[in-house]
């Protein structure tokens, strides 16, 4: 009798848990499961190619990098005087292969508290990565920010 009672209790324990999950905690567990599986994100749609009636591409989007600079990080690295900013801007422009005057002008016009200012809109990805690595090798860490961008090209 005792063994039968123990076996019966052990057999009923999973049933009790199953009833508890389905009746008491069912909606809470479903909500927790969905929150672990689903996540809302805003993804920017990439522009498609424009082709003529024969399928020849007339306009395509090419992956590029947008280059920005954190003025806060520059200030923390000791680049905060106009002369330092001019030297940094000239060095960055040379690495990116763009004219130095607009880059230096944007750096000098920026506030020291700006978290980031856009320097160049569309630069080749490899050039941008090499420029960032070169700046970081010179000891200025986390000041150059690379963002995904595209450029419309008409082959």
Image (cartoon, grey):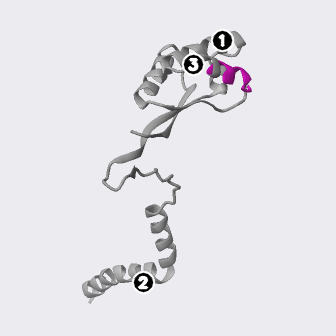
In this orientation, which residue lies closer to the viewer: 34 or 19? Answer: 34
Residue wearing tag 3: 99
- In the rendered image, residue 85, in percent from the top left (x then y), is placed at 66, 15
The answer to whether residue 43 is left or right of residue 105 is left
Q: Secondary structure at mark 2?
A: helix
- In the rendered image, residue 67, in percent from the top left (x then y), is placed at 54, 30
Q: Quadrant of the N terminus?
A: bottom left
Q: Secondary structure at mark 3?
A: loop
Residue at 37 percent of width and 53 percent of height? 52
Instruction: Please tell me whether residue 153 belongs to the stretch shown in magenta.
Output: no
Q: Which mark is residue 19?
A: 2
Q: Which residues are magenta?
A: 103-111
Residue at 49 percent of width and 21 percent of height? 96
Number of callouts in the render?
3
CA gap between label 2 and label 1 equals 70 Å
Q: Quadrant of the C terminus?
A: top left
Residue wearing tag 1: 84
């Amino acid at each position: 009798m005792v063994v039968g009672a123990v076996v019966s209790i052990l057999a009923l324990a999973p049933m009790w848990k199953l009833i508890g999950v389905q009746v008491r905690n069912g909606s809470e567990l479903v909500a927790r499961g969905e929150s672990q599986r689903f996540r809302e994100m805003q993804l920017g749609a990439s522009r498609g190619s424009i082709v003529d009636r024969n399928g020849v591409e007339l306009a395509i989007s090419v992956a590029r990098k947008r280059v920005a600079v954190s003025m806060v990080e520059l200030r923390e690295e000791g680049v905060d005087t106009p002369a330092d900013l001019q030297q940094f801007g000239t060095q960055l422009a040379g690495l990116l292969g763009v004219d130095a005057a607009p880059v230096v002008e944007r750096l000098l016009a920026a506030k020291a508290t700006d978290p980031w200012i856009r320097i160049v809109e569309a630069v080749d990805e490899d050039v941008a990565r090499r420029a960032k690595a070169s700046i970081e090798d010179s000891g200025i860490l986390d000041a150059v920010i690379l963002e995904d961008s595209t450029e419309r090209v008409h082959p």
